[in-house]
Amino acid sequence: MAYEFFFSYTRGNSGQYLQQFFAHLSDELREQMGLPKGTEVGFFDQQEIELGEEWQETILGALQASKVMVSVYSPGYFKSPYCGKEWQFFQMRREAFRRSKAAAGASSATVAAMRARRTPPWPTSSPSRRSRS
């Protein structure tokens, strides 16, 4: 399955706010792309990997099938060997893409990042959205 983004984070940052951020990001992306509610747009290993599944193969497949990597930066992120491997793999894809000088519109491997916070930058209760006319 192709993903619009791969969500990279350290287990030390996992929790309610991280899950809410992923959900909000996915909702916004679906809305911007005109996709139906519930369409999978991002890979988040807390939701995508079934018990007993070969998680390394699943993560590698998602890294290969994602257009963008969204990294949640924190001190723990930079100490995590797994996060480092994800980052390195995506950097290799990015460099290979640059070298290939692919035609416009081809899948890219752009990297996006944010800094982890203790409190979310959005309200915890979701106000109703205004129409965008």
Image: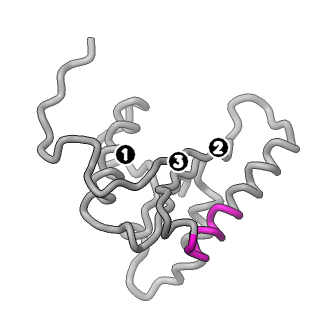
Q: Secondary structure at mark 2?
A: strand
Choose the circle earlier in sequence order: 2 or 1.
Answer: 1
Q: Residue furthest top?
A: 133
* 33 vs 37: above or below: above
Q: Residue furthest front?
A: 75
**Residues under numbered marks 2 and 3 in contact, where contact means CB atoms less than 8 Å apart:** no
Closer to the camera, 118 or 27? Answer: 118
Residue 66 x, y percent position in the rendering:
58, 53
Residue hosting label 2: 110
Residue hosting label 3: 113
* 73 vs 99: above or below: below
Say which residue appears at 42% left-offset and 73% top-offset.
11
Residue 38 x, y percent position in the rendering:
30, 48
Q: Quadrant of the C terminus?
A: top left
Q: Residues within 10 Å of mark 2 (few under 14, many from 20)?
A: some
Residue 122 x, y percent position in the rendering:
24, 41
Q: Is residue 25 left or right of residue 71?
A: left
Say which residue appears at 63% left-offset and 68% top-offset.
84
Q: Is residue 120 left or right of residue 91?
A: left
Residue hosting label 1: 26
Q: Which residues are magenta?
A: 79-88
Residue 108 x, y percent position in the rendering:
68, 42
Q: Residues within 10 Å of mark 1 (few under 14, many from 20)?
A: many
